[in-house]
Amino acid sequence: MIELAEHNQNLRIAYKSTRKSNSKNVVDYNTSLDEIDNTLRKVLSIEDMRKSGTFFTGDELAQTLVGLFKRKINKNSRILDPTCGAGNLLIACSRKLPAYKSLTKTLMIWGKVLHGYDLYPTFIDACKLRIILEAINNRGCQIDCNINKALKLLPNIIVRDALETDREELIQITHTILNPPFTLQKPTLKGLWKTGKVNASAVILAHYLKILPQGSDLSSILPEVLRSGTRYHKWRAFCHSTISGHTKVIGRFNSKTDVDVFILFGKTGGTSKTIDWGTSSLHHEDVISTNFEVSVGRLVAYRDPEIGVDRPFIHSKNVPLWSIIKEFPERRLFSGTAIDPPFVVIRRNSRPDDRYRAAASIIRGNEPVAVENHLIIIKPHSKTLKDCKKLLKVLKSKSTNEYLNKRIRCRHLTVEAVKQIPYFPLKE
Ligand SMILES: C[S@@+](CC[C@H](N)C(=O)[O-])C[C@H]1O[C@@H](n2cnc3c(N)ncnc32)[C@H](O)[C@@H]1O
């Protein structure tokens, strides 16, 4: 994150020249929390931002997170952002703290309250500089020390791997505020996941839920997949046992970042109450899985060698929507499990703003079909075309769209979400 060094240097120069000129005590600096996102986008490509998971929280969302703390922030609070980046969430918290005429006096208080970690020194530098400029520009503090002394008054904002902290160090933390990276990484805590990489936000949050003192306030932005994804089932169960929590669905992170998020907030510590992930009220007795078997297509085009039996081959680009397909333009050799028609397929790619969330087609024919893994297969227990047709109407209905928009806001439908679609066949 060396690219941000020039930005930090400009902040230092602005501070020094304001101090020297002894003029109006306002540094030439835009204090909006949205601005640092623009700065970062000027120096980093979107690929680099994705790789490092550096998407900074804007003004409105940061305020929402702070507003969800149960206990009010005051000068006795000890607030931690374990992945603080350039400090947007800590700045939002500082806005609840008292400020004094003297910058030194203000930072002496803020420095005790605000704790932050990040892997990158330039982010930590930007974070401290921006908190200092916040005190001057937004809170009217008078500059009464040089920049190095001001920086030293924020000793708890440090370069640190958030996953290396232990229980002892966090004993005083009263509030944790968090927008962790959404990158994929190897899991640390065992037993919460199956094999393979998982979302770093789930790993970091689980680490903190395990070691934070009981009764501490927590407010965290998380990717939608954690709220509704099958893969995070055990992680959600772990949350039930470690936080008395609530969720708030937010939708898209910001206009430039195409990822849906929600907030998990509450007090740490075990509880008998379960967290309402916003999906439990959607459970119906008559659901697709009562009448159909749901699975994912077995063929992975780039991986599976072209050996085995010559089969009709379907994928999301060669099955026209809402139609009955019995002739197949493509065939290929496949040695894996092929599916006997009739059955329905729906595309796994599905976005909340799509006209149809469960975009489907019926597959007929006399021979087993090789189905690619971007399609979800729904096979009637009755093995009849009639039930496939009934299902198609249900999938096309407004109520299915509404259900899926509430149940799963991320871009891939899961087998679990499809199984739970309410199944009320409409009259033919
Ligand atoms: C999504 S950004 C959020 C920054 C800030 N909290 C905000 O909301 O504006 C995540 C930050 O986590 C940092 N990060 C990633 N992995 C980390 C780790 N293991 N320990 C500490 N910081 C980490 C990244 O450098 C990045 O600045």
Image (cartoon, rainbow, N blue to C red):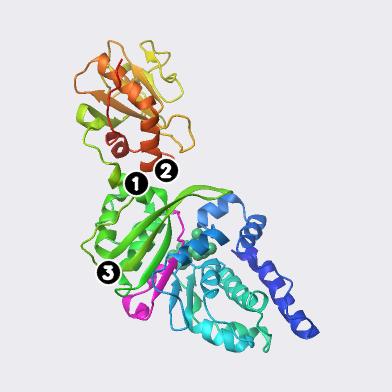
- Circle 2: residue type: Arg
Looking at the rendered structure, the secondary structure element under dot 3 is: loop
Q: Is mark 2 within 8 Å of ligand 1?
A: no
Asked whether, in this view, residue 302 is left or right of residue 210, the answer is right
Against 224, residue 190 (above or below) is: below
Residue 372 percent location from the top left of the image: 37, 27
Marks 1/3: CA–CA distance: 23 Å
Looking at the rendered structure, the secondary structure element under dot 1 is: helix
Asked whether, in this view, residue 159 is left or right of residue 402, the answer is right
Badge 3 density bin: few <14, some 14–19, many ≥20, Cα 10 Å? many
Residue 370 percent location from the top left of the image: 33, 22
Q: For residue 228, which numbered disc appears in the image?
A: 1
- Circle 1: residue type: Ser
- State if disc 3 and disc 1 touch (CB < 8 Å): no
Q: Residue at x 41, y 24 (%)?
A: 315
Q: Residue at x 62, y 72 (%)?
A: 130
